[in-house]
Image (cartoon, rainbow, N blue to C red):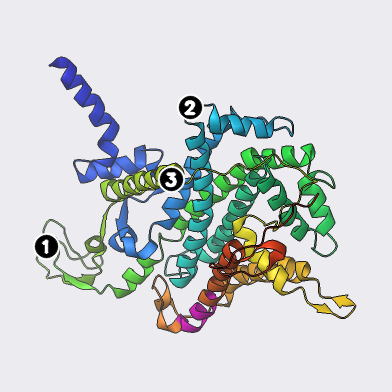
Amino acid sequence: MQFVDTTKQLWNKLIWSWNPKSDKESGDAIVKNLLLHWFPNKITKGSLAWQYSLWLGTISFVLFVILTITGMVLMFLYVPSVERAYSSVKDLEFVIAFGSLLRASHRIAAHLMVATVFLHMIRVFLTGAYKNGQSVGSNRPLNWIIGVVLLLCTLLLSFTGYLLPWDQLAYWAITVGTNIASSAPLVGEKIRFFLLGGTVIDQGALIRFYVLHVFFLPVIVLLAFSWHMWRIRKDGGLAVADHEALSQTAEDVAPIKSKTYSLLGVTGGSTVHVQTSMVNEEKNSVPSAPHLVRRIVAVSIATLVVVVVLAALFPAPLEEPANPSVTPNPAKAPWYFLWLQEIVTDTTIPLGAFTINGALIGGILLPGLLIVLALWWPYRDKSGIETVGVWFAPARNRQNTIFIAICLLIIAFTIIGTFLRGPYWNFYWPWETWPTMPVKF
C-alpha cells in the first residue's frame, strides 16, 4: 500500500504541470517548468483553436525534434567517407535491427518538415499574421523574416542530408542542385566550390555536407526557432489575439465592496457610488496549463504516429552506389527543388546561335526575387489593423490572390518535375510509357 502511495505521489509530481488542480498551480506550472516557460500564463481561446493556426508551427518543431533524435542515433551507425558511407547505410537497411525503420523515419520527418514549414508560412501570410497589432513593442515583420530564414535553413538541412547515402539518387540530385547554384552571377562557381570543397563531388563534398547537416544548420535552426518563439511572446502572442481584442467591448463593472473609493484622496469610505466600464479579458482566455499543454502533447503524439506509420509504409530508397561515370536519365534535383529545375528548363530558350541561360533566370534570379519580395512584403502591406489574424480578410484579397497563385505555381512545377518529366526531361502524361534509355557511361 505504501509503495502504491509513493508511486502515486511520484507520478503526480511528474504530471502536475500539465494537470494542475487550481489556478495557482496553473500559474506555477508556467513559471517553474523550463519547457512551459515559453508560454504565457494565460492564452486566448482563438489561439488554441485548431482552425486558426492548424498547429503547423508546433508540428514543424516536433518534426525537428524527431529529426534530432533519430539523427543522433544514425550518427553512431553512419561513416562519412566515400569508401564506407554507402555500405554503412546498406547495413542500416539490411543488418541492423529496426535500422530501416529508423532511416525511413528520419527521411519522412525531413520531407514533412519542409512541407509543414512551407504551409506554416502560407498560413501566416493568408492570416496577415506578419503585421503588427496593438501590442506595444510588437515587431511581427521581423519575426516573418526569421520565419523565411527558418524555411531556407530547413531546405538546406534536407539538401545537405540528401548526399549522405552516397548512392546514385543522392549523387546526381546534388550534382543538379549545385550546378544550378553555380549559375549565380560572379559568385556562382565560388558557392559551388564552397559547398563541394572542390570542383567535383568527392570526399570533400561528403564531409562538408555531413558537418553542415549534423552540426551547423541544426544549431542555426535551434537558435532561430528560439528567437522566433521569443518574438511571438514579445509581439503579444499569435495574431488572432489582436483580432479578438478588437472585437471585445467594454462592459459595466460593479465596484468591489471591499475597496475604499476616494476622490483625490479627500473622500473616504465606500459610500460614494462608483460605476466603471472595462474589457473583461478573462472571458476569452484560459490557463495555458492544462489547455495549451494538453494540445501540444496531443499534436506531438499524432505527429510521431504519422511519421512512424509513413516510415513503415514507405521505406527510404537506396539505389546503386554513387558512380560519377554513370549518368541517370533523367537526373533530378531533390523534390523540393524540382520546381526550380522545371523553371530552368522552361526559361532556357535557344535564339539562333544564342541561348538564354535558364539556370541563371530560373535557378537564381527568379527565386532570388521571390525571397526579396517575401522579406519586403510585410513593410509594403498597408492593410488596416482589422485584417491582422483574419483568414482571407477582404481588404487583402488582391495580395492573397497573388500569393496563392505563386504558391500554386511552385506546387504545380514540383508535381510536373516529379511525375511528368522523363528521359531528356521530356514531358510525359501519367498514362504514357517512358522509353527505355541506354545508360550513359
**Cα gap from disc 2 to disc 3, whole angstroms:** 17 Å
Instruction: Give the magenta-colored segment's residue range.
Output: 396-403
Q: Is residue 349 above or below residue 337?
A: below
Label 1 belongs to which residue? 270
Mark 2, residues whose alpha carbon is within 10 Å: few (<14), some, or many (≥20)? few
Q: Is residue 59 magenta?
A: no
The type of residue carrying mark 1 is Ser
- Residue 353 in which image quadrant: bottom right
In screen coordinates, is 104 left or right of 357? left
Which mark is drawn over residue 313? 3
Mark 3 Cα shell of 10 Å, populated few (<14), some (14-19), many (≥20): few
Q: Secondary structure at mark 2?
A: loop
Image quarter hosting the N terminus: top left
Q: Nearer the viewer, mark 1 or mark 2?
A: 2
Farthest-out residue, top: 2
Residue that mark 2 sits on = 97
Q: Is residue 397 visible?
A: yes
Residues tagged 1 and 2 counted as in contact (Cβ below 8 A): no
Instruction: Determine whether the residue tagged by mark 1 lies in a helix, strand or loop.
Output: loop
> On the rendered structure, is 278 left or right of 302?
left
Q: Is 207 situated above or below 125?
A: above
* Residue at 43 percent of width and 65 percent of height: 135
Mark yes or no: residue 265 visible: no
Give the x, y percent position of residue 328.
71, 53
Amino acid type shown at disc 2: Ala
Q: Residue 245, labelled with which disc?
A: none
Residue ID at (12%, 70%): 273
